[in-house]
Image (cartoon, rainbow, N blue to C red):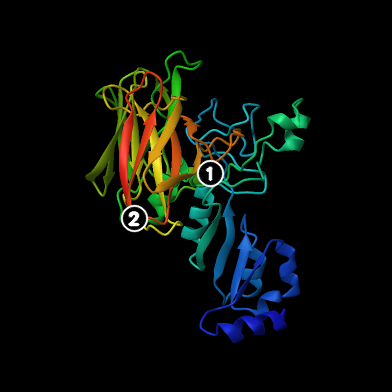
Amino acid sequence: MQTMINYVRKYDPTRPVTMACDITNSAALRHFDFYDVHSWNYGRRYSLARQMEPNKAVIVSESGSTVSTRGFYEWPLPTQKDEFTTSLQVSSYDLSVPKWADLPDEDFMWQQDEEYIAGEFVWTGFDYLGEPTPYGNEWAKAHGMTDKEASRSSYFGIVDLCGIPKDRYYLYKSFWKPEELTVHILPHWNWEGGKMDKIPVFVYTNGDCAELFLNGKSLGMRYKKPNSSKPTERFRLEWTEVTYLPGVLKAVAYKEGSAIGEQLLKTAGEPFQIRLSPDRYVIHADGLDLSYVLVEAFDKDGNMCPLADNVVDISLSGPGHIAGVGNGNPQLFDPFQANQVKLFYGKAMIILGSDSKKGEVKITATSNGMIKDMKQIKTE
């Protein structure tokens, strides 16, 4: 270990050195005497090392591992963190983790209460191919399924496999960037014909409280409880039994007594039009640069359709190419390079790549029965 640390310091003497550790009792070896900062994964495993050497700060070198599927919600809410259903998707209420992992709120609470924790590295930013916890091959076979039912990608990401934010993105944002407005309601509000008429509603916000309205009627205020020993009460606002009525769900967030922002969710009608939203309208004509083009379905009134699963056909003209497509569904085995993509809970992603020639690339998205959309991206 000393040899490795010597090499690190030889090539970069400017920064502290650390080593990620996973087994609490390994602290008895006092390996932390060799490096500068305690680094431990998950569940306050740093506690023994910190007790033995209290003069060094702590980095949580792997935290979280919360699992969820973007846009998918399931009831009743889990009573245990590692409780999973046979749906092969994980509810996006952000209450589900493998038995060895932590909810975001737990990591937030420990960082608040233990000031020597310098921060965390979350597992993971993106979903990724492989490690489809919990729905891997062994789980599928143990529950009477086959390898065909196992997922191909993970559920760990703050954003999905295509980079589309999950609900959890806004929970992290509300804690990590308290100076920036966050008001985010979940779930979506299209539940006609559902099996439950009482819907749990959560709000993630950088405010300290919020008021929820359904079709103009107040459903009451909820307040964060900064001294609660229950982590979710510190960082989330919950209305656990909202009687479903189609219409408009609105959350108004407050901080120190003043309204800071609001969000509206409207019950959407049938998919009527496609909308393309490139993250960049100008890219380099070097054959390497990319523009990520979000694909969404909207109703005739401009409301996003959270259940749309339409197949969208893609056409290009100009000096560019389709570098990839996807929709973030961990169960999907469609190819990443194709001229069409199926919406997953109303969204998908097209990755447009530049060629080596300057010009304008026109990307057009069409789907049967829907108004098409076209965007122009300049390559220079």
Q: Residue furthest left?
A: 258
Above or below: residue 325 compared with residue 146: below
The amino acid marked with disc number 1 is Leu
Cα separation between marks 2 and 1: 30 Å
**Residue visible at 52% across and 38% down?**
328
State the residue position of label 2. Answer: 358
Residue 369: % across, % down: 37, 18
Quadrant in the rendering for residue 88: top right
Task: For label 1, count other residues whose C-alpha is less than 10 Å away and answer few (under 14), some (14-19) or many (20+).
Answer: many
- The local secondary structure at tag 1 comes to loop
**Residue visible at 54% across and 30% down?**
77
Residue 290: % across, % down: 42, 52
Visible in this render: residue 316?
yes
Residue 219: % across, % down: 32, 27
The amino acid marked with disc number 2 is Lys
Which badge, 2 or 1, comes first in the chain's sequence? 1
